[in-house]
Image (tube, rainbow, N blue to C red):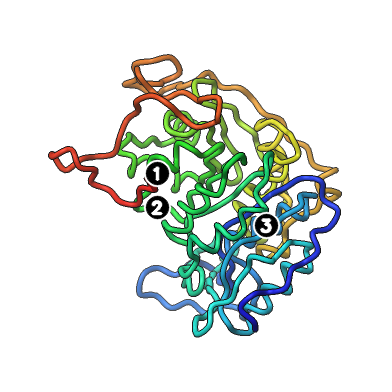
Amino acid sequence: MSNDLPAATTGGGVVGVVVVGSANVDLLVTVPRIPRPGETVLGGDLRRAAGGKGANQAVAAARLGARTTFVGRVGDDEPGAGTQRALAAEGIDCRWLRSTPGTATGTALIAVDSTGENTIVVSPGANARLQPADVEAAAEAVGPGAVLVTQLETGVAGTCAALAAARGARFLLNAAPAPSSLAADVVAAADPLVVNEHEAAAVLEVLGARTWSEPRDHALALAQHAASVVVTAGADGAWWCLRGEQAQHVPAPPVGEVVDTTGAGDTVVGAVAAALAAGSGLAEAVERGVRAASWSVRVAGAQPSMPRSEDLAATRSTRRVIPALGNMRDTTGPYGTPAGAPTRSAGGLLSGPHEGPPTDGEGTRAWHGSCS
C-alpha cells in the first residue's frame, strides 16, 4: 500500500465535517456474559469489521448527508487497505488518510454479551503515529462553517493538532476513551464536548472538579468548562446544555430488541457533527444523534449499524427542560457557574478565569497534555 492513499469522491453532500481520528479493524465475538477478571468464557464465531472511533464517526456523518473528510493513519497492511476501501465506498475524502510502513493498523478486541453491552480493548497501532504535520497538511479541508471532530484515540499530539487546525471551524471534542489527562484549553474550545457518563466523570476529575452521580449534573458541571456539552446516557438518551443555561434531556425513542451497542456513541457524534455543519442548533443536532444511535443498536457491528437519513424518517424524539442544577450543591453563581467563570467570546472560545487543575503546591499544574 502506498504512503499516500488515493482520494475518495466526496459525494453530493452540502455540508462539511472533518474528522481527525482513529481507524481500526474491529475483532468481535459474542459471549453469553462479559467474563470476570481471570475467567474464560466461550464465545461465538469471530467477526471482523472496519472500526475505530474516528472512522466510525466519519461514516456516521457521511451517511447522514455530510461532505466528510477523514484525517488519520493506518498500517501498511491488508486491514489498512481494507479501511481505506471501506471509507472510500462511503464517499469519504481519504486524501489525508496515510499508511505507516512497518506498523499494524489499530485493532479493537470487542466482546458483546447477550444484552448488547460490550467491553473493548484497543491496540492503537498506527493511530498512535498520527503527527501534527498530518493534520496541518489537511488544513485546506477545514473551511469556515465546517465542524472539526476529534477524539482521544490518537494521543495528545493529534488532539492538539486538531484544535490548532480548527481555525474558523466549530470544534467538537469526543473525550473518549476516558482521559487520564486533558488540557483545559482543549476542553474550553469544545463546542460541544461529547462524552458518556464514565468519560464525563473522568474529564471532571482531570480538571480538578467535583464529579456527580447523574448525567444531567455531569452536563451542567462540564458546561462550566466547555462552551457546550452533550452527555450520552445509553437507553436514557442524552443530556445537553450551553454554558449558563438549563440542562435539557433528549429521551431515546423505543428500540425493541437491542442487538449490539458497539458504535452507538460514535453514531451520536457523527450525527451531531453532520447536523451542526448543516446549520442546525445543538438541540436539533442532539435529537438527531439520539435517534441515529437508537437505530444503530438494532444491528450488529459499529459501521454496519449506522443509519442513513431515510432510516431516521420514522423515528422521533422529544426533549424536556429540567431546571438547572436540581440537586447539585456548593455553587456560587447562577446555574451553578462559579463567580468569575469563563464566558463564551465572540470567537467561540472562552475568556475569563476558571477553575484550574490541581497543583503541586508550587503553582505548577500537576497534570499533563496542555496544548499551550
State the separation of the CA atoms marked 2 and 1. 6 Å
Q: What's under tag 3, amino acid-wise?
A: Ala
Q: Identify which residue, 34 or 324, lies in the foreground.
A: 324
Residue depicted at 49% across the width and 38% down the height: 189
Position of residue 342 measured from the top left corner of the image (x, y, whole percent): 41, 25
Q: Based on the displayed image, in which of its 4 quarters is residue 225 positioned? A: top left
Mark 1: secondary structure: helix
Give the residue at mark 2.
Answer: 179
Q: Left of 308 or right of it: where is 178?
A: left
The disc placed on residue 92 is: none
Q: Based on the displayed image, in which of its 4 quarters is residue 236 positioned? A: top right
Mark 1 or mark 3: which is in front?
3
Q: Left of 88 or right of it: where is 266?
A: left
Mark 2 or mark 3: which is in front?
3
Q: Identify which residue, 301 or 160, lies in the foreground.
A: 160
Residue depicted at 43% across the width and 58% down the height: 157
Q: What's under tag 2, amino acid-wise?
A: Pro
The disc placed on residue 203 is: 1
**How many dots with numbers?**
3
Give the residue at mark 3.
Answer: 58
Q: Earlier in the sequence, mark 1 or mark 3?
A: 3
Are circles 2 and 1 on residues that touch, CB within 8 Å? yes
Position of residue 355 measured from the top left corner of the image (x, y, whole percent): 32, 30
Mark 3: secondary structure: helix
Q: Quadrant of the C terminus?
A: top left
Q: Earlier in the sequence, mark 2 or mark 3?
A: 3
